Amino acid sequence: MAIESIKDKTAIVGIGVIDFSTNIGRSEWYSACQCIKLAADDAGLNIYDIDGMVKNIDDGPDPSYVQKGLGIDNLTYHSESHWGTSAMMNAVQGVASGSCNYCVYYQAAHRVSGPEKSISDYRVAREVKDDSLDMIRYDFFSPFGLIGQPGYVAMMYRRYMHETGITPEQLGWIPVVDSENAAKNPNAIFFDKPITIDDYMKSKVIADPIRELDCAPKVDGAIAIIVTTPEKAKSMKQKPVIISSNAAGMAPEGQFHTSYTRDVITELPEMKNMGDELFRIAGIGPKDIKLAMLDDTFTPYVPLQLEALGFCGKGEGAAFIEGGERIRVGGELPINPDGGLIGQGRFDTTRIVEAVRQIRGTSTNQVAGADTILVASGAGGPADGLILRKA
Amino acid sequence: MTVEYNPDQKIPHPAMWGVLYKSSTPFWEGVKNKKIMLQKCKSCGNLLNPPRPMCPKCQSQENEWITAKGTGKIYSWVTFNEAPHPAFKAPYAAVLVELDEGPRIVSNMVDVKPEDLEIGMAVEVTFEDVAEDLTLPKFRKAG
Ligand SMILES: [Zn+2]
């Protein structure tokens, strides 16, 4: 229980997105500077107004490079965070505390063509780094061929099938609906046209029961998001998007995608803790949410997020997504109308961007009345999230 | 039906002498002696696998190692139809075994095909020399 004071203290006023690609042909440094300039233009800000800068550690050049690249005089606030979109919390805290006026959160990662190749294998795992200090995975999983995130998640998913009876025919509706939404999103590069549940069932099973279509592919991209106070936002170019709440969550025995020592491995307790805190700070509940931007890096996490965040009861996630009716635009709780990470590539900040566009009313797949949106990140590990609302 | 390896590729070895942790060393020394060793908290008796620097139940850093019976049940498994590492020949399965003592361990089966695996299947440990310098604890159907 903490930081009630951040409620409605910050707002998103600018977004900058470069086109996703699988071979961008530029440096991450280039893309970081480019997306921040785009976000400043979107906000109607002078680049020199930016005085705070945050990012996730794994994604792109650190603020010293980017400050230099942009030619900004000074940063009174700069920091890095780790998983998901947890650096957003740094931006919110930086602005809410008064450490900076305009904080940019950027994610510039060329995960296909860029310098960072790792075991975190997105759609298909092939490269293995032998020099990691991650004892548990490397000492206790790799010698047995349990290597790569699709396999890690498949271990949980098999158990999930056993415990709840969830089937691929149900789970497949996540990529099907993602593909329908991606086909409407010009910035989504992976589906020109929607797939059907039959396409999904016929698709390649890489780490049984995980199919290739259950995994968000890696992508080159860059996104910047500018946060300031609602007071400053009032006189700015865009209609502000108020950050009603922002929270992170962890839970006992957590390990990224491999929390196998837990008594129950088929829940997302980090997400539950995060969601409880989000709703408590915002003073609202799941029924007030008009649209959910959920982490679909691996599809089994979507029904588990619906359960953890209170959108349905435990064990009801599979039925919620089956057929797609309830999660499509126009349904009871639209999920990821931008196509999600399955449709756009593994790039967590897209969820925040789409939420901003929905509240501004500028999405290419607009949800009517989308004035209160929950954004969740970090499924299968440390969770973080936001509740965003119309001013 | 144990895992088949590509002989010209090095199987990932446990990084026993990793800079960050040495807490896994007793486990792998035990495997060389054909035992599954579990870390036991001296203060509260909590059993831990994989080992770690502190007991998460009581924060004690005093521990000892006990020998597990080597019996358990399949808790879950994954079948790799594409090998994520060149040393392994697909298809093969990695299993998560819940030992009778409680902790779980990732391993492979030596005598059960992936399609014949079942959650709850009773298994017992066996040790397989998979390379000149590497023995792994694997499992076979019990009884
Ligand atoms: Zn203890």
Image: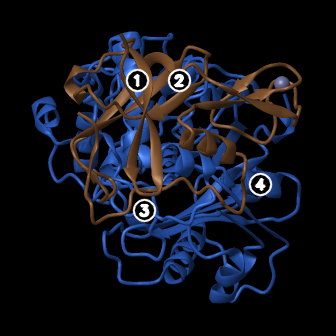
Chain colours: A blue, B brown
Q: Which is more N-terminal, label 3 or label 2?
A: 3
Residue for badge 1: B76
Disc 4 marks a residue whose amino acid type is: Thr
Residue for badge 3: A128
- Pick the residue in front: A101 or A170: A170
> Looking at the picture, how far across and down is residue B71, in whole percent?
49, 17
Q: Residues within 10 Å of mark 3 (few under 14, many from 20)?
A: some
- The residue mark sitting in front, 2 or 3, is 3
Residue drawn at (32%, 69%) of the image? A21
Q: Residues within 10 Å of mark 1 (few under 14, many from 20)?
A: many
> Looking at the picture, how far across and down is residue A61, in whole percent?
61, 76
Mark number, residue A127: none
Q: Quadrant of the N terminus of chain A?
A: top right
Q: Answer with the quarter of the image where residue A156 lies.
A: top left
Disc 2 + disc 1, Cβ < 8 Å: yes
Q: Quadrant of the C terminus of chain A?
A: top right
Residue for badge 4: A229
Residue drawn at (51%, 79%) of the image? A34
Vertical order, A179 against A218 (above or below)? above
Disc 2 marks a residue whose amino acid type is: Ile
Disc 4 + disc 1, Cβ < 8 Å: no
Q: Which is more N-terminal, label 4 or label 2?
A: 4
Q: CA distance from mark 1 to mark 3?
A: 24 Å
Task: Please give left or right for residue A323 compared with residue B133 in the image.
Answer: left
Q: Secondary structure at mark 4?
A: loop
